[in-house]
Image: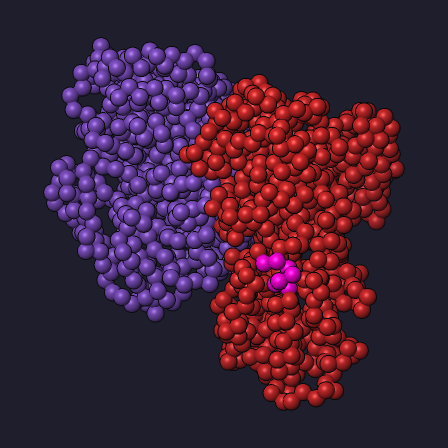
Chain colours: A red, B purple
Amino acid sequence: MELYLLILVLFAIGSAQAASNSADGALCGKAVPKSATYLKPKASRDKRIQDLLSRMCWDEKVAQLGGVGGLLSQNSSLNVQDYREKAQLHNGTISPGSYLNYAEEAVPVLSDLIVASKKEHRLGIPYVHIADAVNGPTLRGTTLFPSTLSMGMSWNLPLYTKVAEVLRDELVACGINWVLSPEVDVARDPRNGRIGEMYGEDPWLNSEYAAAYISTMQEEDSDGFMKVATTIKHYLYGTSIGGVNQASMLGGVNHIYNILALPYINVFKKVTPATTNLNDAGIKSLAAGVQLELAIGFPTAFESLAGNQTVAGVVQNVNEAVTRILELKFKLGLFDKSLEADAKALKESIVLLKNDGVLPLDSVKKVAVLGPLADVINTGTYAAWTNKENGNNTLLDAIKAEYGEENVNHIQGVRIVDTDGADIDTAVAAAEEAGLAIVALGSVAVGWEDSLVGYRTDGEGNTHASLKLPGLQEQLLEAITATGVPTILVLTGGQAFELHDSAQDAQAILHVFHSGEETGRALVNITTGRVNPSGKLTLTFPARSEINPVYYNREQSDWQGAGAIQFPYLEKNYIYPFGYGLSYTTFEFSGASLDKSSYGTKDKVTLTVKVSNTGKVDGQEVVQVYFRQKVAPLSLPVKRLIGFSKVLVSAGSSKTVKISIPVQDLGYWLDGKYKVDKGTYQLFVGDSSADSSLSSALTAVVA
Amino acid sequence: MELYLLILVLFAIGSAQAASNSADGALCGKAVPKSATYLKPKASRDKRIQDLLSRMCWDEKVAQLGGVGGLLSQNSSLNVQDYREKAQLHNGTISPGSYLNYAEEAVPVLSDLIVASKKEHRLGIPYVHIADAVNGPTLRGTTLFPSTLSMGMSWNLPLYTKVAEVLRDELVACGINWVLSPEVDVARDPRNGRIGEMYGEDPWLNSEYAAAYISTMQEEDSDGFMKVATTIKHYLYGTSIGGVNQASMLGGVNHIYNILALPYINVFKKVTPATTNLNDAGIKSLAAGVQLELAIGFPTAFESLAGNQTVAGVVQNVNEAVTRILELKFKLGLFDKSLEADAKALKESIVLLKNDGVLPLDSVKKVAVLGPLADVINTGTYAAWTNKENGNNTLLDAIKAEYGEENVNHIQGVRIVDTDGADIDTAVAAAEEAGLAIVALGSVAVGWEDSLVGYRTDGEGNTHASLKLPGLQEQLLEAITATGVPTILVLTGGQAFELHDSAQDAQAILHVFHSGEETGRALVNITTGRVNPSGKLTLTFPARSEINPVYYNREQSDWQGAGAIQFPYLEKNYIYPFGYGLSYTTFEFSGASLDKSSYGTKDKVTLTVKVSNTGKVDGQEVVQVYFRQKVAPLSLPVKRLIGFSKVLVSAGSSKTVKISIPVQDLGYWLDGKYKVDKGTYQLFVGDSSADSSLSSALTAVVA
């Protein structure tokens, strides 16, 4: 559950007829005949809404704008009196309480409540069942996926769509109608603790993922009802200063449109039907501000309107807002469907950052599994999970299962954040004895009810101003790498870390970001070589915590040049670039070309490149296309991702990859208007955003 | 000289009549009779401008918008051919070249050139002589003051006004008409290398200083001519991300008006005559963008307009721009005055950050002066100075003069930024032998031609992403404090430093920011106790480099709360707060009260407080008033400085201080409109911005 008022925007809801100007409906308080239009499934949605609105009294309208949250305590028990009190003026949405309830216990309770509530309501208006779903439904017993950032690292939209399908079907099975996802915030400040909930730092890439998510969630069922409604958040003006969770926001108009708003705009373009175009609900809210504020906590701003229909100017607004929430409820089929509710592996999101050749591991006789994160499922903030359940499938569990418990020596060495209770010497001895060390370090981000919540340095509410490993973890790593024993560093946390010095003394570095329930096994599948890693960073890793900005899609002057006079002196601002990630094989790109040299503004530019697997194992590569407009009337980023394709190439063979880019996508926003200039565009193709990884410029002229 | 195109805004120039629409003036190219209106000193300025404009051809107009810069090389020699070439299309402004020319040599050369140029000009249009003047005129032999930040730390407007008078009179003596100061940028990011050129982090305080500066500079002489024109810079949209000098800017409308624009707005209110109000030139440019771009470097944007008067829409703009530059020239008296040109201590800007009682020093027999900054005049970027000249009056010189050369052992110990050539052991031995160590450390910011320019980590073009001391300076300090020898840390650099660990092991810490020529002696006057320090920080010092934002006038949610989950764990974000600075005496505040409890919107709130000097020496205290509006329709800073007064109080006595605050100053900007709400305001008085230093709230109701 969000800790503050969530600002949500509903979109793609169509165009309900304009709301009336009266506070009470004309039939307010009157008995409802069975023949009432709004009760007829075959009547048009607009007519049903209008009819229902005309039967509603002022307080009934206001109640639709409020929500009931925090319903169930950890044993799935319902405080009925508390519910009754809250429900009086909050009939819009309902949301579960504790994330740690088992679906099989909580769902029937919630379902009964929702069914009963609809029956009891004077007009039979149902609740919308609303929930967070970053890693999955926030109910135990459902699938735990890695959180958004990890999924972003896969660079695999079809795979992500499959994940979203599973997630959606589980949500439907739990009776959840509306999710508070996707989070399209652009991860511009590495100090922000909520990066794990975002896809990464690129606005275009984020919009691709979000569009896939929304299309999947909002798919219609066989009766034409929307399966699960979505929320793009945390709305637009979203780079809080210093990475502080709720800090104030900066951003000029052009900056907003070109960076912060781009994912929203792209999402609207992609998932909104052609008839509801950029002038529709989405863009309207973009221009005019938030249109609907839904509160999960108490008290709410809207609540105060009850009994007070005389406040100037609010009646029309409330009518409009009620129209929207009712429209959604009809669209979801909540009026028409029965509300009784009935009550799986991801490895492409792991990024191999460094490999001196130690991976994949050959014959392993003994292994020392070290570090405070080896036996932890580090889920991110919004997971129905607790590490009380560990022993399930942590990295340690998976390694024991692989090599036999008797060959695995687990020493934590240091605590997660505390600097007392360290026993680095024993960890060093274990590494030396085993001859192989897997060191699991990172930054804990777990749910509010998790047993490890007190050790959090990542996730909502946290700012990791320093990107160094918490506590004495770096000292542990330094001591282990100093032994000379081959060391594999496994990182976890929804963030970049400072990875110089002892981190670079490790022979291999894997970053899993946030864990799902299969992450431990996925890691072992990678370290053994059964799976060839193919994740790519959607974040730039800064060379030092203090260096900011580091994101690749900077403007020219945002980084100081080579021979930089930025202090401390650094050759490069970053240590790993956006788009970067290693494989167990090697790829070569050749013959990059465009289909034409000159294009009309409605054309597509098609880029062709040959990708050869020059190594000894099959592998997936992410072909990435970036572009730059040569001359523009405002400062634009030095490069912008505009296409990618993940391809499987067998060892020793090659594939020709074609990526098509609509010329219309090469534009930018200037003073609130979208422009695509005629002129010269440079396109680059490669396996990361670093200049050294990219082809020389392919020139496309738009004439 | 600025390294990029300077964007300047002229204001307070009055309201010249609207420019005509024609490219060539009606009398373009015609001979000029002696009776021409513009040549008559007694004609009205508007008529003179109109007449002159009517006689100008297009290229002559364009030439007024350009400037000739970089004129003199280091030996005051002029490359005449180069000048001739540039001057063809650049007759607006002229500026000197090297900062290292002596005034007595350079001024005659420049003066002759300016005189000759006016004579040679077909219409007799003079140049405006334009120059940077951060520390003083950029000519050697003039007074070197500490740079802007240092002067800000004095919290003494009358003293600052005196400095500005000296500076102005020296500028006039050098024939300089227009200075590229004051810099009112709000120092919001400690990583910015140019903070030394700013007054500090508070918009209101900056505007007070800037207003004093401008009023002083622009004073009329006995003939009614403006003495020196000023420039407020770097114009408005001025918090570049990451503290990178030319990085892109962020800022929403309300943020701009309330934080970044506030100094400009206040300055306009204070220095613009009543008839030219907020709707005048200043605010017009605020709303409409820059109105006049003057380039010192080549080529320029305006230059390309020569011979091209047909470009749509530019004629009117050029006419307007030319009108403005001509108006300034008339106002300065350049048309009417002879252009032949004729050819002093600041201790209140030094801030005592820590004192365990070691200061003032008692009887000193021997002293070890350590560190790479002890024998350096660290001026900031824009000074007519070079450390080739040292031996003049560095800290080392002043200490030798005080205690006798034979009693002073100077060991640099470490180099400024390089990590080789260190000799910490010798420095430690010197400290132990002397029994007293003065360690001068910091970050070098000197002019482009200074012999130390290669060691710069502060100043224009530099980003100090890390606020740690450069090179091995921290190691030196650690070694010295570890000896147990009493240690005085003297810091220099236009920036905050990370001051924990070994810095806090020093018995006393003084920060001089940027040095003037008297800073060495001023420091010794303080360490000996002849002067009681009274500087106060205009910057908040962060606890760690990574913690950002730290400025005191944050919004509520910009800092994470006590028991903060910000990582690394810190009790406080800052180590020294805005407004902080120690004295050799102690002060107590008592009896704080307001004159009334309820005010009209046109009233002044008068706060009275008794300040008692409870120590044994006389001293100056800065009484500071902050306020907070209890309820507002947008997020406003938790506190805002709104008044201060520096008072001298004799040992054992007390003074009653009254500070009056116009209710009109308690407002804020919302969506471009200035508002003062009726309601409750809380005022606080104290000796720094820290809550613990402030009185309990005094309540003023605006009714």
- Which quarter of the figure has residue A641? top right
Give the total number of marks visible in the rendering: 0
- Residue B639 visible somewhere in the drawing: yes
Left/right placement of residue A634 relative to residue A643 reads left
**Magenta-drawn stretch, dominant element (helix, strand or loop):** helix
Q: Nearer the viewer, residue B428 or B80?
A: B428
Left/right placement of residue B472 relative to residue B536 reads right
Position of B392 relative to B566 (above/below): above
Image location (x, y in percent) of residue B354: 28, 33
Q: Residue at coordinates 74% horizontally, 79% vertically from top-left?
A: A47
- Residue A536 visible somewhere in the drawing: no
Position of B552 relative to A122 (above/below): above
Q: Nearer the viewer, residue A594 or B295?
A: A594
Image location (x, y in percent) of residue A193: 54, 45
- Which quarter of the figure has residue B135? top left
Query: What's the magenta region?
Result: A101-107
| Residue that sits furthest to the front in the current view | A406
| Residue that sits furthest to the left in the current view | B652
Image location (x, y in percent) of residue B371: 35, 19
Q: Quadrant of the C terminus of chain B?
A: bottom left
Q: Residue at coordinates 57% horizontally, 68% vertically from top-left?
A: A67
Quick check: is B96 in the magenta stretch? no
Q: Residue at coordinates 62% horizontally, 55% vertically from top-left?
A: A140
- Which quarter of the figure has residue A169? bottom right
Position of B421 relative to A391 (above/below): above
Q: Residue at coordinates 63% horizontally, 52% vertically from top-left?
A: A134
Position of A289 relative to B656 (above/below): below
Q: Nearer the viewer, residue B442 or B677?
A: B442
Image location (x, y in percent) of residue B205: 36, 46
Left/right placement of residue A479 relative to residue A207 reads left
Q: Nearer the viewer, residue A394 or B695?
A: A394
